[in-house]
Amino acid sequence: EQLLRWAQSARDDFGPGDAFADYVAATWSALVANSAEPLIISSRLVVRIHRFVLEILGAVRKSPGIRWASPGSLRLVTALCASKLWPESGWLAALDAIGDAHALSLESCSEDVNSVEEANVPIAFAFAEDA
């Protein structure tokens, strides 16, 4: 709860939010398995995590100076999907973020690099590997 508040309080800095999302993604299966009550899409914790992920994805997308998708948030979407706790209403934001990451990787490749594997864009690859 306190970490979520810390991550949400850093409005202009996406680093804490992305780090928190990555942490939650890494520990999500343990959170689900050890929850006192079974988690469902409408559970308070799940709803707060949905809102947090969508806020991060939306804020990153709207920031003109930010040129990356949030890899932690995308990993968290993957973890939520794996536990069948990602709402259908969240797919547009998630797919937009994936599309943005893909576009950035193609842009990076067209500038100096011959192939996507050589580009410095681990975000799209990390999401694809997790999915």
Image (cartoon, rainbow, N blue to C red):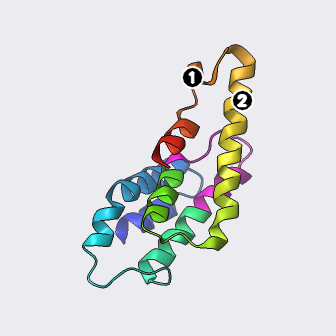
The crowding category of the residue bearing disc 1, from other C-alpha atoms within 10 Å (few below 14, some 14 to 19, many at least 20), is few
Q: Look at the picture and state if 6 lies above or below 26.
A: below
Amino acid, disc 2: Leu
Return the x and y of residue 119 as percentages of the image width and height: 60, 22
SS at circle 1 = helix
Residues 62 and 129: in front is 129
Q: Look at the picture and state if 71 lies above or below 112.
A: below
Q: Are marks 2 and 1 in contact (CB under 8 Å)?
A: no
Q: Look at the picture and state if 39 lies above or below 66.
A: below
Q: Which mark is residue 73?
A: none
Name the residue at 67% across, 14% down.
114
Instruction: Answer with left or right where residue 44 lies relative to residue 94.
Output: left
Q: In which quarter of the image is the N terminus?
A: bottom left
Name the residue at 30% across, 85% down.
37
Number of labels in the image equals: 2
Name the residue at 74% across, 44% down.
64
Return the x and y of residue 130 as percentages of the image width and height: 46, 46
Amino acid, disc 1: Glu
| Residue linked to disc 1 | 117
In magenta, the rendered stretch is 55-71
Res 66 seen here: no
| Residue linked to disc 2 | 106
Return the x and y of residue 22 as percentages of the image width and height: 42, 51
In reply to whether residue 62 is colored magenta, the answer given is yes
Return the x and y of residue 15 as percentages of the image width and height: 49, 47
Instruction: Answer with left or right where residue 48 lies relative to residue 54.
Output: left
Which circle's residue, 2 or 1, is located before the other in the chain?
2
The crowding category of the residue bearing disc 2, from other C-alpha atoms within 10 Å (few below 14, some 14 to 19, many at least 20), is some
Instruction: Answer with left or right where residue 119 lies relative to residue 10.
Output: right
In reply to whether residue 70 is colored magenta, the answer given is yes
